[in-house]
Amino acid sequence: MATKTLNIALDDQLIKEIDNAVKKDMGSRSEYFRRLALRDLQRRREWTKVFDLANEKGRNMGITSEQQVYDIIAEHKREKRSK
């Protein structure tokens, strides 16, 4: 696997916190950032799936605007309060 080197500027306090986290995990700074990046990518994929499913559901319900979503939520809240 080809690798690229990135240089980033961090303040001393943040570096200390990262180094403390690295010591606990018995890894390297590089490994720490790789895991962090992978975790972020996984979260983004999960959120993309959630939004895709929600958008599909909205289309299936005939919702065409954000305002319709707000109206549906408001109506649901009104119904819930009246029970």
Image (cartoon, helix red, strand yellow):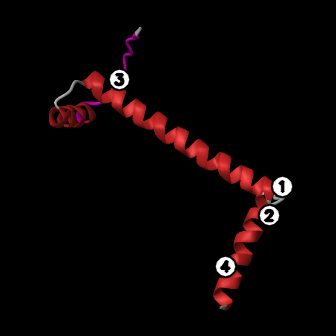
Identity of the residue drawn at 29% across and 22% down: 30
Q: Name the residue tied to disc 4.
A: 77
Residue 1 is situated, as x and y percent measured from the top left of the image, at 40, 10
Tell me whether circle 2 and circle 1 mark residues in contact (CB < 8 Å).
yes
Numbered label attached to residue 64: 1
Q: Earlier in the sequence, mark 3 or mark 1?
A: 3
Tell me whether circle 4 and circle 2 mark residues in contact (CB < 8 Å).
no
Q: Nearer the viewer, mark 4 or mark 3?
A: 4
- Residue 11 vs residue 27, the one in the foreground: 27
> What residue type is disc 4 on?
Lys
Q: Name the residue tied to disc 3.
A: 9
Tell me the quarter of the picture where residue 65 sits.
bottom right
Q: What main secondary structure does the magenta stretch of the protein show?
A: loop
Numbered label attached to residue 68: 2
Q: Nearer the viewer, mark 3 or mark 1?
A: 1
Q: CA distance from mark 2 to mark 1?
A: 7 Å
Q: Which residues are magenta?
A: 3-13
Residue 44 is situated, as x and y percent measured from the top left of the image, at 52, 39
